[in-house]
Amino acid sequence: NAGVTQTPKFQVLKTGQSMTLQCAQDMNHEYMSWYRQDPGMGLRLIHYSVGAGITDQGEVPNGYNVSRSTTEDFPLRLLSAAPSQTSVYFCASSYGGTGVYGYTFGSGTRLTVV
Amino acid sequence: QKEVEQDPGPLSVPEGAIVSLNCTYSNSAFQYFMWYRQYSRKGPELLMYTYSSGNKEDGRFTAQVDKSSKYISLFIRDSQPSDSATYLCAMRMTDSSYKLIFGSGTRLLVRP
């Protein structure tokens, strides 16, 4: 099992450029989410999905789009990159249902917007 | 005010010490509580989880939840240099969205 795979690991963008951060999981998890991690701010939820075709906004959704056409993939799109989007981005997935299920995180994408 | 507060540290202790890491929260609807460990330049990994109040022990790690005080703790016994990492608390309510709310993390350094 590969777990949660994120690509690319590093990216430098110019202000105004767009790009897609890829996330794929092979655990048949229903729930997937995107977080950004900034110093002193912890992990903040951007968007999440409870299943294919279903997405919703998290705490900091502005400037980002998501879609979930398959169970495995949950890409995050930056529409017009801004320096404020410089951050480390983590994708996470979890088995659905009730009870305590932890997230499995990817290794992150380090994004710099200049 | 953040929903989940966590002292950022860093916390520096000698090898073998007992470490206490803590989080406070404001939303009494949180039911599930977790601790994640994050090594430098890696993604977080689940360390411990508890449901509602009480204690849970796993090897050198003990997680405690006091819902009346809105306070959770992680204790590490016989700390090792390999425990040096950032520890994040996380919690969620009993709803269908499975959203986790994270603390900002405490950086721990265990000195040999």
Image (tube, coloured by chain):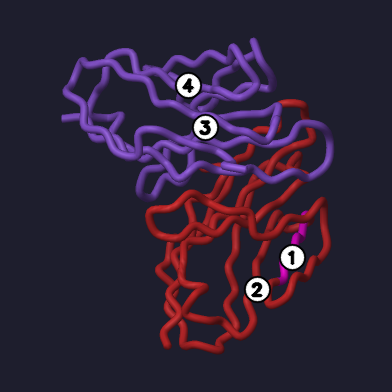
Q: Position of residue B61 (x, y in %)?
A: 68, 72
Which residue is located at x 20 percent, y 15 percent?
Answer: A16
Q: Residues within 10 Å of mark 2 (few under 14, many from 20)?
A: some
- Residue of label 3: A45
B44 and A44: which one is in front? B44
State left or right for residue B98 relative to residue A21: right
Q: How far separated are the C-alphas under marks 1 and 3?
A: 25 Å
Mostly what secondary structure, the magenta segment? Answer: strand
Looking at the image, which residue sits at the far front?
Answer: A1
- Residue of label 2: B75
The residues colored magenta run B62-67
User: Is residue B1 among what the camera can see?
Assistant: no
Asked if labels 1 and 3 share a chain, the reply is: no
Please name the color used to draw chain A.
purple
- Residue of label 1: B64
Q: What residue type is labelled 3?
A: Leu
Secondary structure category for the residue under label 1: strand
Q: Would residue B111 be counted in the magenta stretch? A: no
Chain under numbered label 2? B
Q: What residue type is labelled 2?
A: Phe
Q: What residue type is labelled 4?
A: Pro
User: Is residue A27 among what the camera can see?
Assistant: yes
Please name the color used to draw chain B.
red
Q: What residue type is labelled 1?
A: Gln
Instruction: Kindly indicate whether the residue at mark 2 contacts the one at mark 4 (C-beta within 8 angstroms).
Output: no
Chain under numbered label 1? B
